[in-house]
Amino acid sequence: MKNYDIFCKIVDNFGDIGVCWRLARQLRAEHGIDVRLWIDAFNVAQQLIPALDATKRVQTIEGITIAAWDADTRFEQASPVVIEAFGCELPSDYLALMQAGSIWVNLEYLSAEPWIEGFHGRNSKRGNLTRHFFFPGFTAASGGLLREHGLVENNRKIAASRRLQHDFFQRFELTPPAENSAVLKVSLFSYPHAPIHELLNAMAESSRRIVCYAPATSILPKIADFFGKAFIAAGEHLTHKNLSLHVLPFLRQADYDSLLASCDINFVRGEDSWIRAIWAGRPFIWQPYRQTEDTHLVKLGAFLDVFYTGCTEHARQAAISLHRAWTSEQLSVSNWQDYLDNIDALETFSAQQAGRLALQPDLATNLVIYIEKLHHNHI
């Protein structure tokens, strides 16, 4: 089964397309799959895929066929394998083209909640079609985590190399802090409702100098407000007490990975940047996508329980406290300072966790094997 269609509806800005684009490229590069990626919002996808031409309805980039999915789309033939990303609901006219033998996989959102293991691999019927549910996760009983070959090793090289970090920051006309300095490098990518003012204040008041790198996203007005400015843009450098902040342009995925590996602490959000922060092997704070009935807090708690198992108690509590303060939008200087006081232990533990999780098969490999099994079972 070497032809896959992937349907991606961009609900939350970059997370959905971020995961789908990485998955499509890995399936192509490492498994020889011919992928057609259907995207419903080219204007947003362009930011992550700069080569994408919004005026062309079908185009090929990095060996991936990218097609526009909108009210004007006319489907001619269904692929033998169809991946519905994050329950985006396949269009009815495409479903009508699918055969009883079509392999239909719903790629679910990542979660560390224990119940996903019992639902991973289950299916449901829709007419003569079968919809299979594939759950990413942190255990061998799940679908695993998205991770390209050599990713962790490459991140380790960047984290250990002053030269590689210097070369990366030089592309943005920046010089990283001296290697023997006590300055901490922090990347900031969050939803706008995060307590950004409180975090920047905590950084400014912290016991160590902080250099913060913020890619240009929807949080820039919040950052501008903290520094008393009406507007800021990529390329600006701002300073207040112990905090220096550099506004970066919006980064393509490879550059964002390098930023995560180069920083000492990473603030991430949603799904794609969360997974990449894990593989960076650096301490990070994750902000889950806000859901009704505080479901995101349950998801956060499950992840903290799984990820920080085995961490020293003081460091574990510091990480959990800062995560909860950041997510509850009630962050204090003491939350931040307690985290910094445990940064050495958290750095060691985060690197160990990246290595441990990388021992498990990656999501793309698991997905290909799963699909092949479904195919053989149908035959």
Image: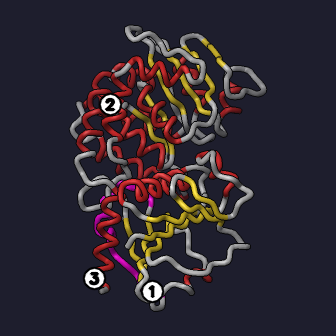
Whether residues under marks 3 and 1 lie with C-beta atoms below 8 angstroms apart, the answer is no
Q: Residues within 10 Å of mark 2 (few under 14, many from 20)?
A: some
User: Which mark is first along the chain, 1 or 3?
Assistant: 1
- Residue in view at x 37 percent, y 73 percent: 1
Q: Which residues are magenta?
A: 109-126
Give the image location of residue 264, x and y in percent: 41, 24
Task: Identify the residue under disc 2.
Answer: 156
Question: Residue sitting at 41 percent across and 78 percent down?
Answer: 103
Q: Secondary structure at mark 2?
A: helix
Give the residue at the far bottom of this rendering. Answer: 128
**Cα distance in 3D space between marks 3 and 1:** 15 Å
Identify the disc placed on residue 6: none
Magenta stretch contains residue 112: yes
**Cα separation between marks 3 and 2:** 40 Å
Q: Which mark is residue 377?
A: 3
Residue 271: x %, y % from top left: 47, 50
Closest to the observer: 183 or 177?
177
For the C terminus, the quadrant is: bottom left
Which picture quadrant has residue 55? bottom right
Looking at the rendered structure, the kind of residue marked 2 is Arg
Proximity of marks 1 and 2: CB atoms separated by less than 8 Å: no
Q: Residue at x 37, y 67 (%)?
A: 134
In the foreground, 182 or 207:
182
For mark 1, what is the residue?
129
> In which quadrant of the rendered view does residue 216 lie?
top right
Query: Measured along the vertical axis of the image, is residue 196 above or below residue 100?
Result: above
